[in-house]
Image: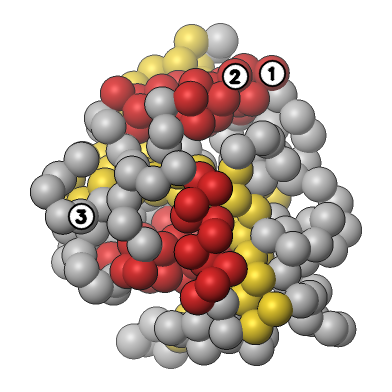
Amino acid sequence: MPEGGWTVAVFDSGVAPLSAHAVAQIRRFVDARGRILEAEPVEDRTGHGTVVTGILASSAPPVRLLIAQVLNERGRSTAAALAAAVDWAVECRADMLHFSLGLSSDRAVLRAAVGRAVAEHALVVAAAPARGATTYPASYPGVIRATGDARCGREQISYLGTAAADFGACPMRRSPSGRVARGASVGAAYLSRFIVTHVAAGLPISKTQEALVRLASFHGPERHHPAAVPWLTDR
């Protein structure tokens, strides 16, 4: 990892080419007729990845970003393409793997890839709904499950400790253009932003979780505020 900072891999729809973010590498992963192709990135047509990247890039100190473009213009991908992107991020020595997305069903190929990342001591943060359906990779062992929490400002997190999610963070971001993004995917991005700002890279996941519990502004579940996570539907 870089001296004194985090390298974060972001798995999403890419990033706008004119975004002033500290992007070290960006690769696109697509599943073509059963073959996983590592290709040149294309435009972020959904804007979701650009929002998530912007949140992470606003941390202090700055982070080194690896962008894995795994979603197409319809917000779709495959577990195999995600798994290939995870392996790429581990090869690039990412300290954190960030997923502001979720699969609605378990897939062995993704489970294995995330397991390899955890075994290599990468911290994995994934969006999960505050209540309701199980999502992946959030539900895999060793993954920090993150969601939105309306109690939290941009510099705050909550320790939820529920069956659905471990931690919550600010669930809304307004862009300079006035566009508002909200939900578990935004909350997960703000949690990762909080981690790279307040926690040292390279700690065991148990120590990172202990630090987050200690630093949380709120303890216990939020009431009456479901947070949605964008679904990634298998092709």
Determine the CA span between mark 1 and mark 3.
32 Å
> Which of pointers 2 and 3 lies earlier in the amino acid sequence?
3
Residue that numbered label 3 is attached to: 5
Q: Nearer the viewer, mark 2 or mark 3?
A: 3
Tags 1 and 3 in contact by the CB under 8 Å rule? Answer: no
Tell me the element at label 3: loop
Q: Nearer the viewer, mark 1 or mark 3?
A: 3
Image coordinates for residue 56, horizontal then vertical, percent: 35, 64
Q: Quadrant of residue 66?
A: top left
Residue that numbered label 1 is attached to: 108
Decide which of 166, 113 is in the foreground and name it.
166
Tags 2 and 1 in contact by the CB under 8 Å rule? Answer: yes
Tell me the element at label 1: helix
Q: Amino acid at mark 3?
A: Gly
Q: How many marks?
A: 3
Residue that numbered label 2 is attached to: 112
Q: Amino acid at mark 2?
A: Ala
Disc number for residue 168: none
